[in-house]
Image (cartoon, coloured by chain):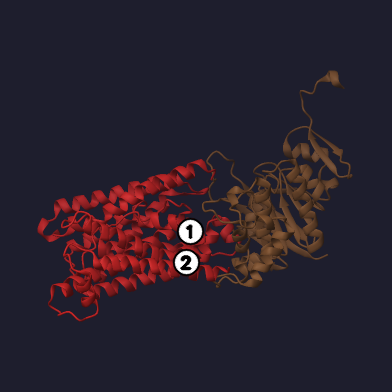
Chain colours: A brown, B red
Amino acid sequence: MSVLVEFRDVSFTYPRPERQRAPRFAFDALSFAVETGELFGVIGPNSAGKTSLLRLLTRVLEPARGEILLDGRPVAGIAHWELARQVAVVPQETPRPFPFSVEQLVLMGRYPHAPGRFFETVADAAVAREAMTATGTLALAPLPLEQLSGGERQRAMLARALAQEPRLLVLDEPTSHLDLRYQAETAELLRRLNRERGVTILLVSHDLNLAAELCDRLLLLHEGRVARVGSPGEVLEQSVLEHVFGCRVVVDKSASGRPTVQLAWSHADPERR
Amino acid sequence: MTERRRLVLALAVLAALLSLVAFTALFLGSAGLSPRAVVRALAGRAEPESIESIVTLGLRLPRVLAATLAGGALAVAGVAFQGLTRNPLAEPSVLGVTSGAAFGVVLAQIAGLGATVTDTLAVAAFAFAGALLAAVTVYAIAVSPGGLAIQTLLLAGVIVGIFFSSAITVVISIVDFNRLGGVIHWLLGNLTPMPPGSLLVFAILAATGFVLILRSARELNLLALGEEAALQLGVNAERLKRRVFLAAALLTGTVVAFTGPIGFVGLVVPHVLRGLVGPDNRMLVPTSVLAGGAFLLAADTLARNVVAPAELSVGVITAFCGAPVFVWVLRSRARMPS
């Protein structure tokens, strides 16, 4: 396996805190690598730097020190449109100031492949249709985004990302707005895309159980540093989690043999034991 | 139907509508010319000094052209500001950009710039600078790390608009009234006939702004997803914003310099068009030129004839149309989660 994404001693500090009361956040010499074809999860407590990591990777933010490499090339030297052909991001939510349809949204994913073009071509439309088919959104194509449920909108945004034909798919909290059924569907869809298309997937989530179930390897972030990297079994260890999250947890095994994490409620009723 | 074909069809329908309104405007007026006399003048078969020639070719035709240009330019500026701010209520007059441009024009008139072609260019430059200053100020006030809040943006526009209006009042109060002869009349937004040279300058400046925005239309679509998402899709967001800001300020400044501050065209026209051709800026920008032209021309024809032989200011008509549309959009957005 070859390395697709590599963070090398990346340091970064927000120039000023986004909110005054938020703790000052920084990465300090962060290093890790994502291999081609794997399903890689980044987990950690709130404000551990999960979203910032995605922003650094997609050049929304620039690191103060260190390097981020995509396929061995520093991303700092790659133009945004060129980067967008390799890396597609599925955000948590999308603003909807105007009533764009699902099809129009998905076609936007074709922009980096010909930024100078005014209208998309027939070939672009075919790629978009294929992306909608893969995510089960083809029937929704003419509908405006605001008429969709949270799960449908999530899949539409995933279709837009697929229309970019990326090598790396990056998802920011892919299930945060979804109920159980859509969480399961999204997980299954991501697994299938990874398997059938060979798309490398990097997902950021605070949902430890989803990440454990879905990912080949996990990166646990703690205050801008790597707390641990490895298989879900290696990372989701009780002592590590209790240190990082600052609370008591119980680590168990799911039906598939992956670890599951639960809060150890301190007020558990002794009668029920 | 492909997008290209839909666009051509929409443009054809709107061109027919614009021609219809333009012909109506040429035949209507307080001079009470017979249709036959107007046709004679248009065909060049009337005496150059005859009433029908002077009224049709010297008054009505330039006015029709000016109204069409101004309406088209304002509608496109509206689409541009809406795309930039991701807000369907953004519009040159709502954002205070029109007032900024008007302040520039008042300054130019104090400087003694007149009606020659070079002078009109200089006046347009002043208006452009004022428009740009107002637009950038409003944006800077409203922008925050989390994006652009609609309410903040609208309030910032109102405040900046009030500031520049007050500045205009101050200037008018201080400066010798005779030097600002036509200012009050002009401040209401009026499409008085202008010489062909000025019309040509007007057309060239408006076309420049239009082309810049048309070329950014696809990227403006992506900007609707938010600046971060646009960047991640490969759009150079900073360059896009700079270019569209400049172009929209150029359009607004030009219209204000040549016809005075006319409000709400950039709100009404894009709103109606979104209902007809959808939210895609590649459809909206070109169709706005024709629809905006037809709208302002119709408003001006109404203004000329509704209280004939007196005249209403065209800005009054557009405001009467714009205010209800503004309220409608505001209410329907309030119901929608953003």
Please state if B309 lies on the left or on the right of A148 as rendered: left
Look at mark 2 in the image and give the residue it sits on.
B10
Q: Nearer the viewer, residue B3 or A272?
A: B3
State which tag comes first along the sequence, 2 or 1.
Answer: 2
Dot 2: element: helix
Q: Where does residue B242 sit, x and y in percent of width and height?
A: 44, 63
Please state if B293 lies on the left or on the right of B282 as rendered: left
- For the residues labelled 2 and 1, the Cα–Cα distance comes to 9 Å
Dot 1: element: helix
Q: Nearer the viewer, residue B136 or B31?
A: B31
Look at mark 1 in the image and give the residue it sits on.
B276
Kind of residue at disc 2? Ala
Q: Nearer the viewer, residue B54 or B250?
A: B54
Please state if A154 lies on the left or on the right of B87 as rendered: right
Asked which quadrant contains residue B14, the reply is bottom left
Kindly check if marks 2 and 1 are in contact, taking CB atoms under 8 A apart as contact.
yes
In the displayed structure, would residue B168 be above or below residue A181? below
Q: Where does residue B204 sit, x and y in percent of width and height?
A: 33, 74
- Is the residue marked by circle 2 packed among few (<14), some (14-19), or many (20+) residues within 10 Å? some
